[in-house]
Amino acid sequence: MAIAQSKITAQGQISVPAEVRRKLGLSPGATIAWEEHDDTIVVRRVGQHSFASVHQALFGASSPTVVKLSTKDGIKKYMQLKHGR
């Protein structure tokens, strides 16, 4: 069952309907991926982590030349702070 419909412009562009944007949590500048599964095309949201959030997780407020944590430990600490686990 279709959630919504879009028309394709002459340039091959589409508008993502508001219902779909809300369901996928998309905002301006978000990236979506098109995947083929058998005879079906699936549209999904691409990861939400920006370079800035990864940098903050690894280096905190300090300069990137000062490494206080390993990459794995930095990401673990960031995810714990962000998700409260």
Image (cartoon, rainbow, N blue to C red):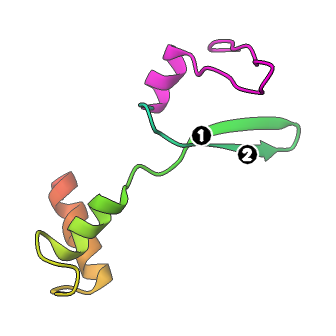
Q: Residue at x 70, y 26 (%)?
A: 13
| Residue positioned most to the left | 61
Q: What label does residue 35 carry, if any?
A: 2
The reply to whether callout 1 and callout 2 are in contact (CB within 8 Å) is yes
Q: Which corner quadrant holds the N terminus?
A: top right
The type of residue carrying mark 2 is Glu
Tell me: residue 81, above or below residue 16: below
* Residue 16 picture location, percent across and down: 58, 22
Q: Does the segment drawn in magenta span residue 16?
A: yes
Q: Where, quadrant-wise, is the C terminus in this rendering?
A: bottom left
x and y percentages locating residue 27 in the rendered image: 41, 31
Residue at left offset 74%, top offset 13%? 7
What residue sits 88% from the left and 37% below the top? Answer: 39
Q: Is residue 66 magenta?
A: no
For this view, does 57 lie left or right of residue 44? left
The circle on residue 44 is: 1
Bounds of the magenta segment:
1-25
